[in-house]
Image: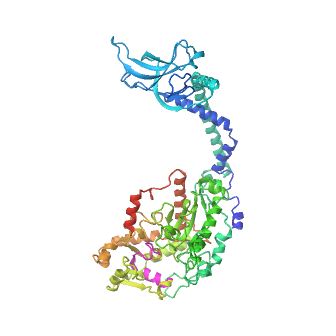
Amino acid sequence: MDRERRRLRGRGGNNNHPRRVLADVVIRFDPTWLVTILLLSLLLLGKATGTTATVVVSGSMEPGIRRGDMLIVRERRNDGDGDDNIRAGDIVLFSTELHPVPIVHRVIELHERHDGGARQMLTKGANILHSLSTLHRSKCAQFTNLEISNNLSIGSTVSLIKSAPKGGGRQQRRAKGMEKVAVGLLPPLRFIAVLAVVSWTSFIYCHFSLLSGGLLLGHGGGDDGADPCRGRYIYVHDLPRRFNDDILRDCRKTRDHWPDMCGFVSNAGLGRPLVDRADGVLTGEAGWYGTHQFALDAIFHNRMKQYECLTNQSAVADAVFVPFYAGFDFVRYHWGYDNATRDAASVDLTQWLMRRPEWRRMGGRDHFLVAGRTGWDFRRDTNINPNWGTNLLVMPGGRDMSVLVLESSLLNGSDYAVPYPTYFHPRSDADVFRWQDRVRGMQRRWLMAFVGAPRPDDPKNIRAQIIAQCNATSACSQLGCAFGSSQCHSPGNIMRLFQKATFCLQPPGDSYTRRSVFDSMVAGCIPVFFHNATAYLQYAWHLPREHAKYSVFISEHDVRAGNVSIEATLRAIPAATVERMREEVIRLIPSVIYADPRSKLETVRDAFDVAVEGIIDRIAMTRGGYARSWLRPKQSRQALDARRRRLS
């Protein structure tokens, strides 16, 4: 990682980057001028909105309003109905010969004059017979009848800023001085505010215009000067090796309960290369590997090393990547260890992150990592089995980050589903195009196909019914994946079957989602779903919202009850519609595969590119104040309970 960081030094570190330019302006900007501009702008805003600030000098309106309190008063504008909009409780500002500085009264009641003259109002406030020098010492309230006229400023209190409860003569002098500043100087300050705002707006506009010109010149001029990485910069944490490389070295710890993972983490996480058979199922070209379905941690990290918009300056990053191999960490301590051991690396990681300055900037909400398993594997406290998985996404720190998983838990707002790794990892755009042309011309011998084993211990699972319907027709072919069988562990067998079928049946297995969904799509086979959570509620970034464009849905409830024939349903789809659906599946192939991390596609966007774009957008929304996106709105407890019932 140190070598990689040195290689990337200067990448994203261009001194002409707009964020650095803005940072430079802020650093050089005198804060005194900034405060002055803000204050003058507020005064200008007050003038435009009819808002006046005044300080109460006397104690005549105590206890509600004390000496020294500042009132922000919004003037009641004449709305065409005369003085009907004046109400009891409004503030009245007026001056007399004795008091050039406005006196504050409050309206007590309104009443009509019997002679038909102007309406009058009874007000309470400072005694207007006192001189200005003695007014601030007065606590005697005077009730005064005032005629409503244009000489009075009448309005409602927008804000009341309380003064300190004590202070004696100092408070009186302060109140008197504040009133002179707030009211007596408003007219000249408003004029100055106009000049200040106009002047500084012109200065900032000219300053940034020159800077923009410098940016273009610095890049050679022309349209090519636009920063292609704007809004896409990623900073990668240089984690200690114990969080990634050392975990891979423990790959043999899994062989007591799961297959030895060491062979699967070779070749940048892709596994061993596959040798094509004589029938050319895998095209006879490079790019096909025996990739494990849970190897995404390493694949994604190695792809990130080749990402074109990396930066070694976290201050300009739009997102921060944490290369922790959470999925591999799950495997090595899952069997035969206590929960403290299972959580040890996750606790260590979160404590390390929360000490970093990059974390403190947004509390980790701009951080993301890849945990190449289902979201449930990292939320042990919410699982039925209290000994299954780690608590990475529940513990402090972990729950603040965004996490890319193979299957989202759907009930939490921080994990987002990305496709399972497939066997196909092209090295160039040409590899992708050749494969798409190949599957487009395949002869589809079978109407439908199924790869999977039954789940006899789960009465809700419909695999037994699907296998029975498949066995009952010659239009269906399947690979049995019973315990001890090797058929489903042969990529060649799986891809050969999918290439020869029009529709591929994808019922839930141990969880809602299946790697088989993406293997079948790579083969150009139209997926048939039986539960919304298998794809429709999961892969919002990678699959279209118009589900019928690329897939078929048959309710699992109808299959379980024996109310539907899968074969009849599929045969009822017009041939032209089937052709359009297959073409859509073929079009989607790039977005559901991960290119070889050691190479770079030029124009084709693969699953990595789509995921990075999605997570950066999500973090941008969080940075803008949106903790939940429209894809995952904040829900009430009742809504969450209802969703759990639908998914159960």
Q: Is residue 47 above or below residue 293?
A: above
Q: Quadrant of residue 131?
A: top right
Q: Is residue 522 left or right of residue 233?
A: left
Residue in front for this viewpoint, 17 or 286: 17
**Residue 33's spot in the image, x, y percent?**
66, 35
99 and 27: which one is in front?
Answer: 99
The front one of 234 and 122 is: 122
Q: Which residues are magenta?
A: 491-514
Q: Is residue 485 left or right of residue 562?
A: right
- Does the magenta segment cover residue 511? yes
User: Is residue 123 shown in magenta?
Assistant: no
The residue lying toward the viewer, choosing from 535 and 438, is: 535
Position of residue 595 relative to residue 115, above or below, is below
Q: Which quadrant would the N terminus be assigned to in this image?
A: bottom right
The image shows residue 99, relative to residue 574, as above or below, that is above
Task: Give the x, y percent position of residue 517.
Answer: 44, 74
**x, y (%) of residue 341?**
60, 73
**Number of numbered discs overlaid on the protein picture:** 0
User: Which residue shows up at 50% across the image and 64% down it?
Assistant: 416
Residue drawn at point x = 50 percent, y = 75 percent: 435
Q: Quadrant of residue 28?
A: top right
Q: Is residue 112 above or below residue 43?
A: above
Q: Quadrant of residue 512?
A: bottom left
Colouring method of the image: rainbow
Q: Is residue 53 visible?
A: yes
Where the C terminus falls, by quadrant?
bottom left
| Residue 303 in view of the camera | no
How far from the left and from the top, in percent, is residue 343? 59, 70
